[in-house]
Amino acid sequence: MGNKIENLMPFETAPFPMSRPRRLRQSDWMRRLISETQLSVNDLIWPLFITEGTNVKEEIPSMPGVYRYSIDLALEAVNEAANLDIPMVALFPHTDAALKTPSCDEAFNPDNLVSRATRAIKAAIPDIGVMLDVALDPYNSDGHDGIVRDGQILNDETLFALEKQALAHAEAGADVLGPSDMMDGRIAVIRQALEQNEFQNVSIMAYSAKFASAFYGPFRDAVGASGALKGDKKTYQLDPANSREAIQMVARDLAEGADMVMVKPGMPYLDICQRVNTEIGAPCFAYQVSGEYAMIAGAADNGWIDRNKAITESLLAFKRAGCSGILTYFAVEFANMQEDFL
Ligand SMILES: NCc1[nH]cc(CCC(=O)O)c1CC(=O)O
């Protein structure tokens, strides 16, 4: 009896010409009434890159319009985001190559760059959420998310480091931790460590369906990891061919104590977003990653697409797929667009 879509149809449409679906598309006011999906600044998380120094704001060549900020200027940028009602920022460090080691000790240095930035933001702008990645790659001389020995990315040894990093981040005041490493067992280890150290209110947004993707290239430039990375991340990040496995990882991370999950990259994986939202139903976020930013910004800079329309359409797609929200480098730009509109 019919396919799934037919089964879900709440009514049968009359045959043409009694039914003319274009009637509901005739005017802007009618289209707004009929719209099935809303996108607002409440849906956005703004990732931003932090660097050492003062008064530094340097553009990332492969992400025109995206900058690395020293902490003093990051405060101004985050303040702008807060004034635009963006609920949360996600901070990523650009780490000096001299601080990268095989044991990744800088990851859990309580005074590392992101910890200092988090303390400064929470003190000055308490009403915006701060999320920090839990992963070793910014601090690893091998560029990987795990500790490498003899060419192997060691799972269990990495977990000890991630646990220390998670606690250092919580101590610094991070509201949400984003384990983005894809090691097995990391959510359970981090959740247990948080519980045992009175960080019960720290949330975990697990990068659960994180694919081994070509779309992370500009990010690795932004955090200075491109030069360090040897090989690829295919032994821990997911195969882009796999959907069932992605759903399984989402279920596993929730069972280990994640509060929210993430699908990453975003646009090439909208099917995964939709599956998570219909089959699992936990709060799910999409990460519109650096390469997606670069494609839209690059095409718009060349006059090949309309920047504002492409941004809005690309973000709306995640809401249509059922996501609670989106990590996007366009967050502040989109919020400013909305302000202009009002
Ligand atoms: N664990 C690191 C991490 N956290 C977020 C991103 C990518 C974000 C982006 O491309 O915008 C990556 C890169 C990677 O896994 O190599």
Image (spheres, rainbow, N blue to C red):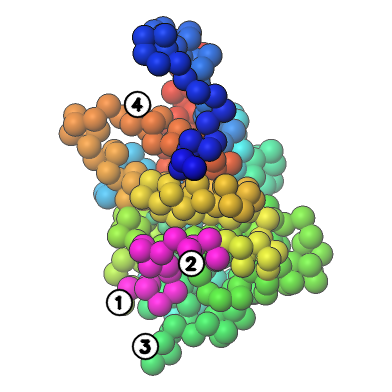
Name the quadrant containing residue 305.
top left
Question: Sequence-wise, which precedes: disc 2 or disc 3?
Answer: 3
Residue 77 part of the magenta segment? no
Question: Sequence-wise, which precedes: disc 2 or disc 1?
Answer: 1
Name the element at disc 4. Answer: helix
Residue that mark 2 sits on: 245
Q: Position of residue 221 (x, y in %)?
A: 32, 59
Residue contact between numbered discs 3 and 4, judged by CB atoms under 8 Å: no
Question: Sequence-wise, which precedes: disc 4 or disc 1?
Answer: 1
Name the element at disc 3. Answer: loop
Residue 312 seen: yes
Residue that mark 3 sits on: 151
Q: Magenta span covers which residues? A: 232-249
Residue contact between numbered discs 2 and 1, judged by CB atoms under 8 Å: no
User: Disc 1 and disc 3: Cα gap in Å?
Assistant: 10 Å
Q: Position of residue 222 (x, y in %)?
A: 36, 56
Is the CB of the residue bearing disc 1 within 8 angstroms of ligand 1?
no
Identify which residue is drawn at 58% across, 41% down: 324
Name the element at disc 2. Answer: helix
- Residue 47, compared with residue 182, is above or below; it is above
Residue that mark 1 sits on: 231
State ligand 1's quadrant: bottom left
